[in-house]
Amino acid sequence: MNSSRKEVIIKEIIYWKEHKMLPDHYCDYLLALYSEGEFENNHNDRMKSNKLVNRLSLFLILIGALLLISLFVIYFTELAFVLQMMILTSFVVLLLILGIYYSKKETWYYIFYISSAILLLLLSVQLTDKFFYHYSIALLITLFLNCILWVATGWKLKLLFFTVSGVVGIITLTIYILV
């Protein structure tokens, strides 16, 4: 059978499979038969890469929405301070749980850790601003503690960008204090 005919048949079988016109195992058998086993490997690789891209897009949308909601809750609403902090804390905990869950399954798990670190920084700065309003030393201590937490997290989880971010933050704060 010539190759153009095989391509037409393979495209038709793929259409049947996508639209559930035949059971999947029949379509898999026919695809393996007409492609002589080559289709299965290429198709599985494409399916895996599509799933990874779709999952990454979903993660980025989720994290972007959480960050935007957090900023909106803090700066543009008249909610009580305790309610604002509870919302931020729940977002941080949710992102940490997702990071821990996906650290064993995915390669993009560190996005959750980065987002939770940003939200934790926002949360700690808000708390410091609320309780120590005009004390810049309290804000500096809070920022130092966040940077130390980033260095420790980077060292523990072997994530270089956390370590580098923490060290750069500590150096920047030290320069700010000395100048």
Image (cartoon, rainbow, N blue to C red):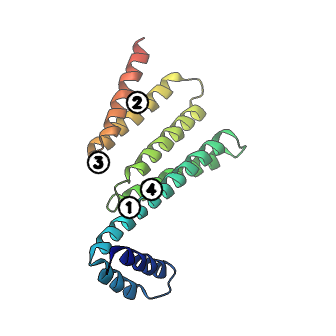
- Label 4 belongs to which residue? 56
Residue 49: which disc? 1
Question: What residue is drawn where x is 42% and y is 11%?
Answer: 179
Image quadrant holding the N terminus, namely: bottom left
Q: Mark 2 and mark 3 in contact? Answer it, CB < 8 Å.
A: no
Q: Amino acid at mark 3?
A: Leu
Label 4 sits on a secondary structure element that is helix
Give the image quarter of residue 165.
top left
Q: Which residue is mark 2?
A: 144
* Alpha-carbon span between mark 2 and mark 4: 31 Å
Outermost residue, right side: 78
Spatial distance from mark 1 to mark 3, Cα to Cα?
26 Å
Look at the numbered disc 2 and give the secondary structure of its residue.
helix
- Residue nearest the observer in this picture, 151 or 105: 105
Residue 113 in percent (x, y) is at: 41, 48
**Three-letter code, disc 2:** Phe
Give the amino acid type for the residue marked by disc 1 in the picture: Ser
Marks 4 and 1 close (CB-CB < 8 Å): no
Sequence-first disc among 4 and 1:
1
Query: Dot 1 surroundings within 10 Å: few (below 14), some, or many (20 or more)?
Result: few
Provide the residue designation for mark 3: 157
Distance, label 4 to label 3, CA atoms, is 21 Å
Q: Element under label 3?
A: helix
Q: Nearer the viewer, residue 127 or 174?
A: 174
Label ID, residue 24 = none
Q: Residue at x 46, y 88 (%)?
A: 22
Mark 2 vs mark 4: in front: 4
Q: Earlier in the sequence, mark 2 or mark 4?
A: 4
Front position among marks 4 and 3: 4
For the residues labelled 2 and 1, the Cα–Cα distance comes to: 40 Å
